[in-house]
Amino acid sequence: MRSCSIYSPYLLINFFFCLYPLVFCQLASNQKNLMINISQQLDIPSSPWNSTKEPNPCRWKGVTCSIPLNNSVVSLSLSGFGLSTSNFLPMFCQIDSLQSLNLSNNFLESIPVEFFNSCGRIDGLKSLNFSKNELVGSLPTFHNFVGLESLDFSFNSLSGSIDSRLNDLVALKRLYLSSNRFNGSVPSRIGQPMVLEQLELSKNSFTGPIPTDIGINQNLVLIDLSFNSLSGPIPESIGNLTKLQMLILSSNLLTGLIPATLSSITTLQRFSANQNNFVGSIPSNITKFLKILDLSYNNLSGRIPWDFLSPSTLQTVDLSYNRLEGPIPGRMSSNLIRLRLGSNSLIGPISSIDFASLQNLMYLELENNSFTGMIPPEIGYCSKLALLNLAQNQLNGTLPVELVNLTNLQVLKLQLNKLGGEIPSQIGQLRVLSVLNISWNSLNGIIPSSISNFGNLLSLNLQGNNLAGSIPDQISNLNSLLEIQLGENKLSGKIPSMPLNLQISLNLSSNLFEGPIPRTLSGLLSLEILDLSNNKFSGEIPGFLLGLSSLTQLILSNNLLSGIIPKFSSHVLLNLSGNPGLYNATNSVSSNNRRPIAVTIVITLAAAALAVGVVAVVFLLISRRLYKVNNAQTQSCQELSPPQIMQGNFLTANGIHRSNIDFAKAMEVVANPAKVVLKTRFSTYYKAIMPSGASYYVKKLNWSDKIFQLGSHDKFEQELEVLGKLSNSNVMIPLAYVLTVDSAYLFYEFAPKGTLYDILHGSLKNSLDWASRYSIAVGVAQGLAFLHGCASSPILLLDLSSRSIVLKSLKEPQVGDIELCKVIDPSKSSGSLSTVAGSVGYIPPEYAYTMRVTMAGNIYSFGVILLELLTGKPAVSEGTELAKWVLSNSVRPDKRDHILDFSISRASLVIRNQMLAVLKVALACVSVSPETRPKMKSVLRMLLNAR
């Protein structure tokens, strides 16, 4: 460093002395005392600011002092310190050397006015960061702050208009106000016109046009106005921003043409204006300097210009969901990484593309157009392809064997075309494939055994073809599979063992399978949908299907099944039509009751000499009848010996519950499987009526996965003691517990209406009007906000779904299974993703790689529950997750009312508007990015405001 060279001996001596900071380079005493004072005010357990352990504040976490003398504090970062009170903030303003203050990622709800009055006097203060807190109210007015260059209030709940509150910030270069609730118009002036460089106002409620004089801010490098309700055209003056690098206008109500003046901005690298209402053709030169272009989900029409995809800088282009016509341009940039042209009206062959030049292409999505011809073998040159989607076109011919050269391919979607021929046996070379969908084509031949190489495959969909032969035995090796769709083929023969981790669906319908339903299906304990309809299965419905505890739909229609229908749990939707040989157990009993009477009449007319024989025959017939009836009562109705109680303790101080609950009586109940009223992935609920007549839930925790970490009973009891002291009407609080040799049982108040899933998707769904659904949504939100805000530490939910919410009445929900995260260690699960983190359809996308339960993950699951209440649909329907379906159908705000449950939204315009407001909350909750999801307190506040 030049300042410490031999040519600067004075500075070199200073640097030498600063090797001994405790002696020579101490913080000024007034600042040191002030910092120690502040540390005592913070009141943070195990605070990293501890003057006892480290007397020099310059060495505290987040504290930066001046260099080289360390005699003043210049930067403070308390990000993620868990701060919830803000009384201490004005003390920072006494540090007159402060240049940067970062209080992001805390729980602050307000900032004292004194802070702004005092800190405005610090001329050297350049940066303030209050992002990711829980701030409410309007944006503060900034007086003085003449040196402030960066201001960040993003990810809070601030509201109101901005107006002229920032006009005095004459040095402001960077303004970040994203993810708040600001409304009104975008201000035409912020600070000084020639100073502002970055403007982020996304994810608010701004309305009106983009200011026409935005072009005067000629130093702007970044503009992000996405996810608002801005209307009108993009002003032509935006072409004057000659330094602009990023322009993001996504998810607004903008209209008009895409201005050609954008093509004159030589610095522009990213232009995103997707999910608006732009019309007309695409300016031909707009991609001249761009790296990223996203104009998807608009109403653009006409042809794609012939040189549109050829500029060498171009890396990502998304024009999907427009009305574009004509052929696809053949010339493309060799640096192209992603090309999305799906859901347009494009025609012609895709062989016009020079695939050999696309060595960097990773994502190619051309689905839902009218492309014709064959899949060109040259596509095999795109060795980096990770996603290839050619679905819903008119492609014909066979699958080119060159597809196997795409060794990085993870998603292959070719469904709904006219493809024929056989599946190449070499397809197993695609070893990293996670989704394979070639459904609804005209493929023939067999399913190749090489599919056993698909070690990462999550979804296999070959339905709607002419595939014949048997299912390869090797399919059982695909341990990652969550879904198998093989319906509508000509498959036959033995059904092999299936991957034990199957969760979403196993569909073998409309094939040529025959014989009894095979026992190879008995291990699918996580499976939710089993479809064996339209085959020739015969014999009885096997009892092992009762043991598939995760089943929600069992479809056995149109087979040759006979015998007694087992009694499945009420949460399993059965379709057994088209099997005339099936009958209920009650019919069997009445039929057999008549047989002894008829036999007795015949025997009475016989000779007296046969009396002994008559007695023997009657005895034999009665024995057979009793055997048959008892046989019809499956294992689910057999009583076992009551579990032996090792320990039983009360967690509640409520005298009524303590006198009502009888541990011995409860153990008699759990020994009778007929008393089961609910099964979840981790628990089994029994209804126990106590001698007093009071009803309670007795919940057995299932230990089968060996993921429950009892370790010692003491730890388990300590966790339950904490939970038992909680008090919230929207949370199921454990009242008592019993430990047995191999399990644990928890006691709760009984909820007479059952689970939200049963009510919402069962026969009583019509009883849930909007008032009830809204009350349930608010009640669940209140329960979650309470759990997330627990003083000791947040209580997270491992499996939040509509099945884990019970209803005391149609407007009184309670969140259950609050103890699971305390007694389960998800990281030690040997099972599948949903075993680790809940039920399919509610699992946040990030859990697939983090395997860690988080608050943001709970928010996602709650968002899915909101969508269930709004749409009336289950979280997974026919293999499609509700959240993904809603997200794909909600990109245009004017179409969102089609998502709503019409039987509810049609009641009145007021109800429809309320539902749309709640839908906006749900969409925020199920955001793909965990960082953008609101916190539970904010969610509750938004729901209450939607009233």
Image (cartoon, rainbow, N blue to C red):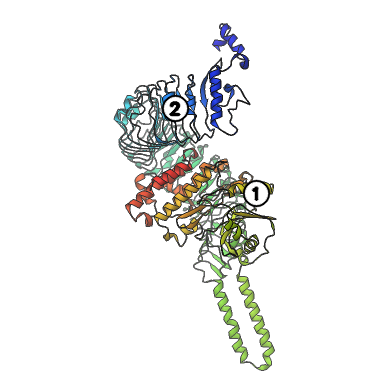
Residue nearer the viewer, 760 or 817? 817
What is the x, y in percent for residue 791? 55, 41
Can the viewer see residue 4 in this picture? yes
Left of 541 or right of it: where is 136?
left
Neighbour tally class for label 1: few under 14, some 14-19, many 20 plus, Cα within 10 Å: some
Give the mark nearer the N terminus: 1 vs 2: 2
* Disc marking residue 115: 2
Q: Quadrant of residue 633?
A: bottom right
Residue at disc 2, secondary structure: helix
Residue nearer the viewer, 536 or 11? 11
Q: Quadrant of residue 317?
A: top left
Q: Quadrant of residue 147?
A: top left
What is the x, y in percent for residue 388? 48, 42
Left of 355 or right of it: where is 275?
left
Can the viewer see residue 398 in this picture? no
What residue is drawn where x is 45% and y is 61%?
Answer: 764
Neighbour tally class for label 2: few under 14, some 14-19, many 20 plus, Cα within 10 Å: some
**Distance from Cα at disc 1 to Cα at disc 2:** 46 Å
Tell me if residue 643 comes above or below residue 258 in the rendering.
Answer: below
Tell me if residue 564 comes above or below residue 818 in the rendering.
Answer: below
To which residue does mark 1 refer?
717
Identified by mark 1, the residue type is Glu
Residue nearer the viewer, 422 or 346? 346
Residue contact between numbered discs 1 and 2, judged by CB atoms under 8 Å: no
Task: Work out which quarter of the rendered image holds the N terminus and state it.
Answer: top right
Residue at disc 1, secondary structure: helix
Identified by mark 2, the residue type is Phe
Q: Nearer the viewer, mark 1 or mark 2?
A: 2
